[in-house]
Image: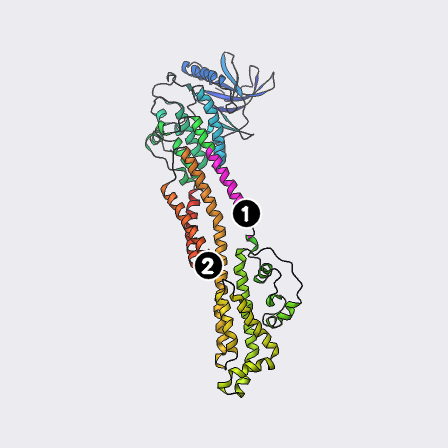
Amino acid sequence: MTTQPPQRIGDYEVLSVLGAGGMGRVYKVRNVITDRIEAMKVLLPDLQGHEEVAARFLREIKVLAALKHPHIAGLHTAQTIDNQLVMIMEYVEGMSLASRLNMGPLPAPDALNYLDQVLSALAFAHQRRVIHRDIKPANMMLTTENTIKLMDFGIARTEGEPNQLTAPGSTLGSMSYMSPEQIKGETTDERSDLYSLGVSLYEMVTGCKPFEGDSSFSIMAAHINQTPKPPLELNPSLPSAVNDLILTAIAKAPEQRFQSADAFRFAVQRVLKGMQEEKTFIQGSDKTITGGGFAATPATSPTAAFMAARGNTPVPAAKPASPPPIPSVSAPPAAQTMPHMPPSAPIQQGSSRVLYMVLGAVILMVVIAGAAMYLPKSKQVSADAKPADTAQPAAAAAPATQPAAAQPAETAAAAPAEAAAQPAPSTTAAAPAVTPKSSFAPPRPVAAAPAAAAPSAQAAADAAELDEIERDIDLLSSRVAAVNNGLDNLQRQQAAMGYGLRGDMAARQASMKNNFAKAQNAIAANDGARAKRYAEAAAKDVEVLERFLGR
């Protein structure tokens, strides 16, 4: 027998060979009358005398003639040419999903979209009591318009029809996709097709078949006895809802699978909808985080942040061009000539802590500068006076000998008194209040000014740390919200299919909520250590749940 295709069969010009199977060969042909490109299926020449093969071929023609559906490759006509029965079918331009899988697994949304189309075709066929019996990626054609066409009803049969056309001891179908009841030669129904489709979906999203072996017998035994590895283990990024969908479809017992193509399709659509809603929510959260003002915080210096927060209130240390020690003395006159600034927006809760921190730093700088100016004079006064009378004369002489320095001292005393009325920086206000007294004492207490700087610097560091923790909690809140939304969607989908959320994941979600709430309460109470501890615990819970959701 020649391997070259004939040049012409009846009114059809043969253009190429599309494929060949156990019973026939499929050509790409052109109708010389209509000029339409079609597909022609003919029996192999050496099988034309086999009655059961000819009967099966004729049955395929009749089955396809009754199935007019957008996701089923349609039959145009059937005729006898040169005493040979041929089928003229719709030509589908594209590639099979089996060929597509040679490039790697499909993304879960694409696989579910293709599966939805196949289930639409199967539901239509099953309603007409037609069982395909050979569902596999090779029989699903992906067109150039990204739609699926189900093909090859060559071994399809009508439900309830006896297997009279199956030879004794033989099994029809593709071994890797056959249902256990089909392997055992038992009566099959539409749930057998759904099993094969579940195996196909497993391969689409993982790139592997659930049951593989060195021989046909080992593959058949695996279908009947072996528990498949969850697809989530092969593809950790797979959403858990898709994992559950596949495992339900390939259950060993038909009664544990989806009971109809419509039920399977409804579950697929629910999972697709949940994935789309979760994607939309996460994208919205990302836009909120990047556009809601968080990005501006790291780029703002403390002075700029303070200036933006204070509105039109003059502050001596706000003069940016002067070195730190000198502006603290000359700031009050300069502050009187500062141009009036328009009132800024209301201070947000997050900026008040920055204001207190900068105020404390400004007051500390004023006190240190005043102490530096007064120390030489106080030493001279203490050398000429008696130790018992030092305190009172020095206090009286200071305004006369150093009028310029007295003004910063009064400013320093007034500023802490005003700052003490604020609720948060209690340690910052208390430290400068002691400093003026020590500046008039004998030389022994001179070290009091550096000692006073330590609590103020510590307070500033604590405030900065609280700000950092608060920013971390704000960022964590979007992840917590996304996880809660994803778990809620998953629970709704599983409830529709009669499932419930895994117990360990439900416990992890409760732990996440509890830790995050405690972190928020601790940061509200300015307890940085507790806030950080609970925020880190909540972040660990979020990471576990995100991996469970396939992110």
Q: Quadrant of residue 48?
A: top left
Q: Amino acid at mark 1?
A: Thr
Q: Is residue 345 left or right of residue 531?
A: right
Residue positioned 52% across, 56% down in the render: 350
Query: Looking at the picture, how far across and down is residue 327, in whole percent?
Result: 61, 70
Residue on which the image places disc 1: 288
Front tag of 1 and 2: 2
| Category of crowding for the residue at label 2, using alpha-carbon neighbours closer than 10 angstroms: few (below 14), some (14–19), many (at least 20) | some
Q: Secondary structure at mark 1?
A: helix
Q: Secondary structure at mark 2?
A: loop
The answer to if 28 sits in the magenta stretch is no
Q: Position of residue 143 (x, y in %)?
A: 54, 28
Residue 359 sits above or below residue 546 on the image? below
**Range of residues picked out in magenta:** 270-293
On the picture, is 183 further left or further right than 262? left
Residue of label 2: 526
Report the front residue among 44 and 408.
Answer: 408
**In the image, what residue occupies the spot 39% across and 39% down?**
501
Query: Is residue 286 a member of the stretch shown in magenta?
Result: yes
> Is there any visible trace of residue 376 in the rendered image?
no
Q: Is residue 454 visible?
A: yes
Return the residue nearer the eye: 340 or 155: 340
| Vertical placement of residue 272 versus 397, above or below | above
| Front residue of this view, candidates 374 and 73 | 374
Give the answer, above or below, for where 171 lies relative to 297. above
